[in-house]
Image (cartoon, rainbow, N blue to C red):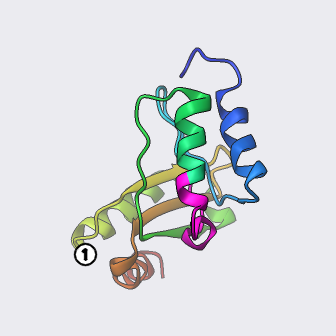
Amino acid sequence: MNREIGFGRRLLQILEDEGISYEHTPSGIDNMSVILREEQLAGDVERRVLDRIVKELRVDEVSIERDLALIMVVGEGMERSVGIAAKATAAFARANVNIEMINQGSSEVSMMFGVKADVVEKAVRALYEVYF
């Protein structure tokens, strides 16, 4: 995937064709994830989208991870502040919250964490304790 031109565009085109918006698209060298609201895959939409991804993009694997909650830590004071991410990850560890996904933009004013929905309140409390 990392050497394939247009993969991301073609994946997002499938979603657009099906009328699906997305929250975030984290990616790695050889994978791409799309985070979207589960209700957008109601009925036969999920099967149709998965079939199109497999057929049109010829991917090795497609999987769906359900019940993920996104938490944003945002603030201009984060920019160029050493240890901000370490505080968050340490807080999650102390609260026994596994980080499913993490992303920090290049502007350094926000970090996004994905955690299982059933621990989101515990995760937010843990962050609040270290930052406030």
Residue 34 visible in the snapshot: no
Query: 36 left or right of 120?
Result: right
Vertical position of residue 3 compared to residue 102: above or below: above
Q: Position of residue 45 (x, y in %)?
A: 61, 60
Residue for point 76% across, 59% down = 19
Which is more toward the observer, 56 or 96? Answer: 56
Which is more toward the observer, 127 or 24? Answer: 24
Residue for point 71% across, 24% down = 6
Vertical position of residue 119 compared to residue 81: above or below: below
Residue for point 49% across, 29% down = 59
Neighbours of disc 1 within 10 Å: few (<14), some (14-19), many (20+):
some
Task: Look at the numbered disc 1 and give the secondary structure of its residue.
Answer: loop
Counting labels gives 1
Residue that mark 1 sits on: 95
Which is more toward the observer, 93 or 67? Answer: 67
Query: 76 left or right of 65?
Result: right
Q: Position of residue 115 (x, y in %)?
A: 39, 67
Amino acid identity at mark 1:
Ala
Query: Could you say which quadrant of the image residue 8 lies in?
Result: top right
Vertical position of residue 56 compared to residue 79: above or below: above
Residue for point 41% across, 48% down = 63
The residue stretch that appears in magenta: 35-47
Q: Position of residue 73 (x, y in %)?
A: 56, 68
Q: Position of residue 124 (x, y in %)?
A: 43, 80
User: Does the stretch in magenta take in 67?
Assistant: no
Query: Could you say which quadrant of the image residue 101 lies in?
Result: bottom left
Residue 116 visible in the snapshot: yes
Vertical position of residue 49 compared to residue 98: above or below: above
